[in-house]
Amino acid sequence: MSLRVDIRKSLGSFTLDVDFTAGQGITSLLGASGCGKSMTLKCIAGIEKPDEGRIELDGRVLFDSAQGVNLPPQQRRVGYLFQNYALFPNMTVRQNILCGLNREKDRSARERRLRDMLRRMQLEGLEERKPAQLSGGQQQRAALARILVSDPQILLLDEPFSALDGHLRDSLKVEMRDLLQRFGREVLMVTHDRGEAYNMSREIAVMDAGRILTLKPTKELFADPGSVQAAILTGCKNIAAARRVDEHTVEVPDWGVRLETKQQVNEGLCAVGLRAHYFNPNAVQNRFPVRYVEEMEEPFETILQFRYAAQREDSPPVWWRLPKEKKSAVFPAELGIAPANILLLYE
């Protein structure tokens, strides 16, 4: 099963122009606020109409501007979970879920599916409560129950954890991931949180200004984001302009260093990225003199900022992040980083 999206829509400040295929499992659209992620979901669900293009779900055409096809939302078999869950406030949990079964005319079948969904979503005993009487996690499960009981072919999640506080958000990620894996169909999730995308997704599409910059398996994306914007969105703190020297060497003028790379350096290189966790005072390769700048303390880690000996004074300091228990009393005179950890960036 797969979702194929190739659409364009003018949004004023930029044009949404997305072209991607999502397979079975959870795919995240990762990008900053306002980049077109939620609009992409709305076009798939039929809430918004693209200016042109085609949307196909498991071989069934949902939208095709050339052929004049534009199925209404109720015919698309697409489940859409809004940021605020959109539960009907004056209805009970039971009534909200039954809204997803309005096409089922057999009363016994409706009751059977309702009971099954209450059990699966751990909502038994809460049937007569209204949304205001539920916790954030219970509201989320009730909203999902209303969607899943209608047996959609794909589930669209628009920032599903944004309405929850930090502690509850973390505890529900695993619960939601396990539930969606049991769902067994495509899930497309919008998020601006890289940790959320990493924890939840089989693959991630990075979006910027209405375009898909790259779509890769999750771990592959973090190991090799490929572009400056993708590196930023995946949390890389140290990015600097660079030029190719040879197949396995780059020069970084702002830092005053040449770095050896494991990955082949191609033409068109514009920058390199160094993740803050990957520096090592014992590394032999890409080892250079450094000087301490300042320190920032986090609850469980320390960020040590430094400059390379030949680094330009008007360039930002480099970040080195490490667990507090591994911090030495004396700042090292030299630091290195493995060639495999040099990110080559081409946009």
Image (cartoon, grey):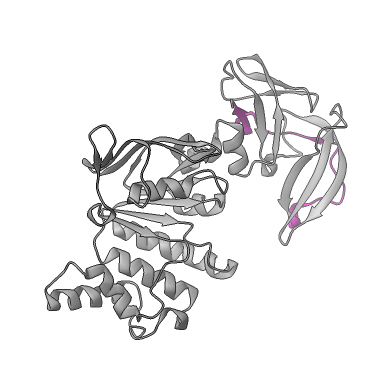
Observer-nearest residue: 207 or 46? 46
Percent coordinates x, y for residue 338 in the rendering: 66, 32
Please give the count of numbered marks on the rendered protein: 0
Q: Is residue 306 above or below residue 25?
A: above
Residue at 57 percent across and 46 percent down: it is: 32
Q: Is residue 103 above or below residue 71?
A: below
Percent coordinates x, y for residue 247 in the rendering: 60, 15
Question: To which quarter of the image does residue 126 belong?
Answer: bottom left
Residue at 75 percent across and 57 percent down: it is: 325
- What's drawn in magenta, residue-wise? 324-345
Percent coordinates x, y for residue 89 in the rendering: 41, 77
- Examine the rendering and report whether any part of residue 106 can be seen: yes
Q: Residue furthest top?
A: 246
- Examine the rendering and report whether any part of residue 202 can be seen: no
Percent coordinates x, y for residue 284 in the rendering: 72, 30
Q: Quadrant of the C terminus?
A: top right
Q: Quadrant of the N terminus?
A: top left
Residue at 83 percent across and 40 percent down: it is: 306
Observer-nearest residue: 324 or 255? 255
Is residue 46 part of the magenta span, yes or no? no
Observer-nearest residue: 227 or 36? 36
Observer-nearest residue: 310 or 43? 43
Residue 78 is left or right of residue 205, and the answer is left
Q: Is residue 10 above or below residue 154?
A: above
Question: To which quarter of the image does residue 289 belong?
Answer: top right
Residue 99 is left or right of residue 172, and the answer is left
Residue 245 is left or right of residue 212, and the answer is right
Residue 324 is left or right of residue 235, and the answer is right
Q: Is residue 305 above or below residue 302?
A: above
